[in-house]
Amino acid sequence: MLLLDHSAWARRLRAPIRDRFAAVLRERLFAVTVPFLLEAGYSARSARDHAGLLSDVRLLVRVPITPDVERLAVGTQSDLARIGHHRLRPIDVLIAACAHQAHGGVLHYDKDYDVLHEHTRLRFRSKWLAPAGSLD
């Protein structure tokens, strides 16, 4: 299972990966978290766009933010502060903690997940949507 990050979701319609992303979405191989839903909803341009987003993801598995995930996220930020990386986006830290707790991965287009994977105790699969820099 791969949790969606908004960095991947926002690029899902780009030509190189559009068909593959749609196929995997139909197969329900993704999961979502409330932080993802809020971030994706924030980027909606209208009520109709927001409703479409919710329709697209309503059938996907939801990974909850449990007290254990909260402790993992706060502890991870503390660990990162000790090595000079505490300025990662809180939503990324939460999603990575959810992926760790769910024994899954994160589909992203964001180098922060590599930092989280390499420099913290969180164990999750960091899966780039496409090679870094190829969709910018």
Image (cartoon, rainbow, N blue to C red):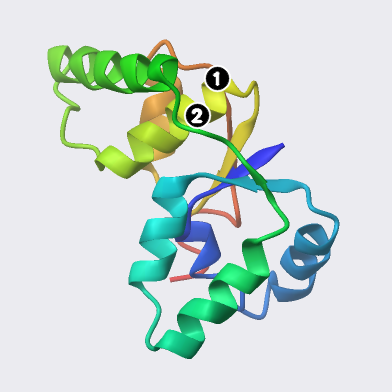
Q: In which quarter of the view is residue 1 placed?
A: top right
The C terminus, quarter of image = bottom left
Q: Is residue 81 left or right of residue 94?
A: left
Q: Which residue is mark 1?
A: 101
Indicate the position of residue 53 as horizontal and vertical percent values. Answer: 55, 73
Q: Is residue 115 left or right of residue 66?
A: left
Q: Which residue is mark 2?
A: 98
For mark 1, give the secondary structure.
helix
Q: Please tell me which residue lies in front, 5 or 115.
A: 5
For mark 2, give the secondary structure.
helix
Question: Mark 2 is on which residue type?
Answer: Cys
Check if mark 2's residue and mark 1's residue have beta carbons within 8 Å.
yes
Which disc is residue 33 wearing?
none
Q: In which quarter of the view is residue 19 placed?
A: bottom right
- In percent of the image, x 83 and y 65: which residue is there? 23
Q: Please tell me which residue lies in front, 82 or 92.
A: 92
- In percent of the image, x 19 and y 27: which residue is there? 85
- In the image, is residue 98 above or below residue 14? above
Indicate the position of residue 98 as horizontal and vertical percent values. Answer: 50, 29
Q: Please tell me which residue lies in front, 2 or 125.
A: 2
Indicate the position of residue 87 as horizontal and vertical percent values. Answer: 16, 36
- In the image, is residue 52 above or below residue 128? below
Q: Is residue 131 left or right of residue 80?
A: right
Indicate the position of residue 49 as horizontal and vertical percent values. Answer: 49, 85
Question: Mark 1 is on which residue type?
Answer: Gln
- In the image, is residue 91 above or below residue 115? below
Question: Callout 2: few (<14), some (14-19), or many (20+) C-alpha neighbours within 10 Å?
Answer: many
